[in-house]
Image (cartoon, rainbow, N blue to C red):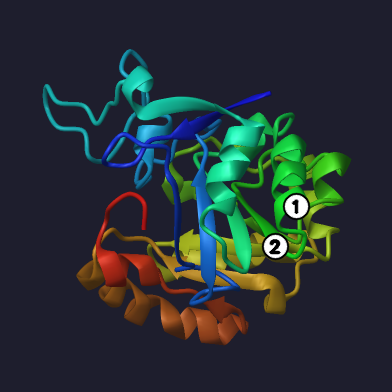
Amino acid sequence: MLLNVARDDEGAPEIFRSIQGEGRNCGRQRTFIRLSGCNLHCVWCDTAYTWNWRGTDFHHERDAPGAPHKFDRAKETVQLSSEEAATRVLALPSEGLVITGGEPLVQRAALPALIDAIKAGAPSMLIEIETNGSIAPPPTLVERVDLFMVSPKLAHSGNEPGVALRPEALGAYASLPSAMFKFVARSPADVEEAAVLAQSYGIGAERIYVMPEGSDSAALSRRSRELVPAIVRHGVNYSPRLHVDLFGQKRGV
């Protein structure tokens, strides 16, 4: 089965080894594979090259008059078999693999074969999926994935709540011990929104990470200072965007 994989700045499949910059495993070495395609369209998305195709009418904050923030799907996507993708991952050994996007679960039917091929070569490799939480995980993935890092999209993302916050999907993740939750926030009000949402699904504070939105260190630092009082008040975890601080806003890092 073929996978749609994003391309890096050199045009190669975006499969790389780096430091995890977010969430529970921040600072740990990981291998990443970035899949192309997403069912949501966040107005501040920093990987819009995985979904904001020319010819679509999606809005992005980087749109300018006469110059929308659009990408050529054929140039930004490469198809790889599960075996070829696994071979590329195994050539970059690390403690764990992060399957990210885009939205990986758009391609959920192809992911078990990818994971099995990787596990055949590296049985101890931990498997993590970064997801927006709008698609419930099928049993074939629940039994194969060590960590779901679920990032439900709040109102400031620009997505319709009925599309982004699906009760059946969020309820499924809330019931999984292997799921942690990461909320992107721009203001203390977003932390409050996240806390209310988490409480409605019975998600404990120890499972929640709040991360500032931003594509450069200055914006992240400013927002972090604004968010921390609300984060402390709710007893949840803070997540940086360490890769942005280390490398800036670029692909393959």
What residue lies at 51% left-to-right and 57% top-to-bottom?
A: 92
Question: Which residue occupies the foreground of this view, 157 or 143?
Answer: 143
Question: Which residue occupies the foreground of this view, 197 or 43?
Answer: 43
Work out whether 39 lies above or below 122: above
Q: Position of residue 142 (x, y in %)?
A: 83, 50
Give the left or right position of residue 80, taking residue 119 as reference.
Answer: left
The residue tagged 1 is: 119
What residue lies at 69% left-to-right and 77% top-to-bottom?
A: 205
Query: Is residue 46 at all visible to an observer of this figure?
Result: yes
Mark 2: give few (<14), some (14-19) or many (20+) Cα within 10 Å.
many
What residue lies at 49% left-to-right and 37% top-to-bottom?
A: 159
What residue lies at 35% left-to-right and 28% top-to-bottom?
A: 76
Q: Position of residue 207 (x, y in %)?
A: 70, 72
Asked whether the residues under the numbered discs 1 and 2 touch, taking CB atoms below 8 Å apart as contact, a structural biologist would say yes
Work out whether 221 lies above or below 186: below
Q: Where's the C terminus, which quadrant? A: bottom left
Tell me where residue 234 sits by quadrant: bottom right
Give the amino acid at mark 1.
Answer: Lys
- How far apart are the alpha carbons under marks 1 and 2? 7 Å
Give the left or right position of residue 198, taking residue 9 as reference.
Answer: right
The residue tagged 2 is: 125
Q: Where's the N terminus, which quadrant? A: top right
Give the left or right position of residue 109, taking residue 249 as reference.
Answer: right
